[in-house]
Image (tube, rainbow, N blue to C red):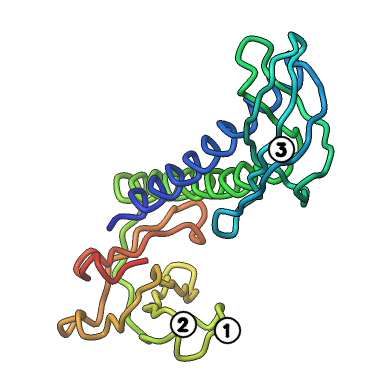
Amino acid sequence: MKKSTVLLIVMFAGAVFISVGLLSILPVVKLKKSGLKTEGIVTGTDFHGKGLMVATVSFKTAGDVEISSSARSHKHLDKGEIVDFWYDRNTPAKITFGDTVGYDMRAVYGGGLFFFLGLFYLLKYRREDQLKNKLVRSGMKVDAEVVAVCRNEKYNMGESAPWIIKCKWHDNINDIDYYFISSDFTADPAQYLGGRTLIPVFLDPSDKGKYFMDTSFIPENISI
């Protein structure tokens, strides 16, 4: 699966979490703002899994109508307890204890983290692709010598670290050796070299630190 596809899935999941959180928060905020505040007696409580308590309260509306309704509560409520809450003046059965916003914001924060991390890396990889395409079109192509196929030590993960290919190219004009590192691989890419000792590398002539190593001969499913 391509990186962009994975990141779009991550962003979509983040957007879903944000939407779920907001769909829970907005009715509470709206009801606290436009509803009527009153008090009632807790007639029952229930828990659904590891979520919030659902409390049922009995109360009288401003029109002296007896109502029984339920809503989620972040607080621990006991049967027989007198509590404050808000109800919809037009549909009194719609109530809120007004204390679940902070709890539901966790979904918004978590979803936002997933969404913006996905967006950040999506833009990052797209910039890298643009640079790669520019280098392939107008960069300087050299054949770099394969000097090692090894784990990427920068991750400090030992035998769990991804694999990389290291190459070297000697600039005869300036008598300088340049070293290049491939992108990461989830499996040892040596088996796919097929006897190759040279790999094409495209350089930015004005900044040889900007380069693209063409490892398109290696299957995409082991590329990170």
Task: Describe the element under mark 3 as helix, strand or loop.
Answer: helix
User: How far apart in space, not on screen, are marks 3 and 1 (Cα)?
Assistant: 41 Å
- Residue type at numbered disc 2: Ala
Q: Which one is in front in this view, the residue at disc 3 or the one at disc 1? A: 3
Closer-to-camera residue (124/79)? 79
Residue that mark 3 sits on? 101
Please state the horizontal and vertical placement of residue 73, each as a whole percent of the image: 71, 43
Q: Residue furthest left?
A: 194
Task: Describe the element under mark 1 as helix, strand or loop.
Answer: loop
Task: Describe the element under mark 2 as helix, strand or loop.
Answer: loop
Dot 1 crowding, Cα within 10 Å, few <14, some 14–19, many 20+: few
Label located before the other in sequence (3 or 1): 3
Dot 3 crowding, Cα within 10 Å, few <14, some 14–19, many 20+: some
User: How far apart in space, not on screen, are marks 2 and 1 (Cα)?
Assistant: 7 Å
- Contact between marks 3 and 1 (CB within 8 A): the answer is no
- Residue type at numbered disc 1: Asn
- Contact between marks 2 and 1 (CB within 8 A): the answer is yes
Residue that mark 1 sits on? 156
**Count of labels in the image:** 3
Relative to 84, 186 lies left or right: left
Return the mark for residue 140: none
Please state the horizontal and vertical placement of residue 77, each as a whole percent of the image: 77, 48
Closer-to-camera residue (184/10)? 10
Q: Which one is in front in this view, the residue at disc 3 or the one at disc 2? A: 3
Relative to 213, 22 lies left or right: right
Please state the horizontal and vertical placement of residue 223, each as a whole percent of the image: 32, 67
**Residue found 64% across the figure and 32% down from its top:** 25
Label located before the other in sequence (3 or 2): 3
- Image height check: is 9 above or below 157? above
Residue that mark 2 sits on? 161
Q: Residue furthest bottom?
A: 159
- Location of residue 146 (image quadrant): bottom left
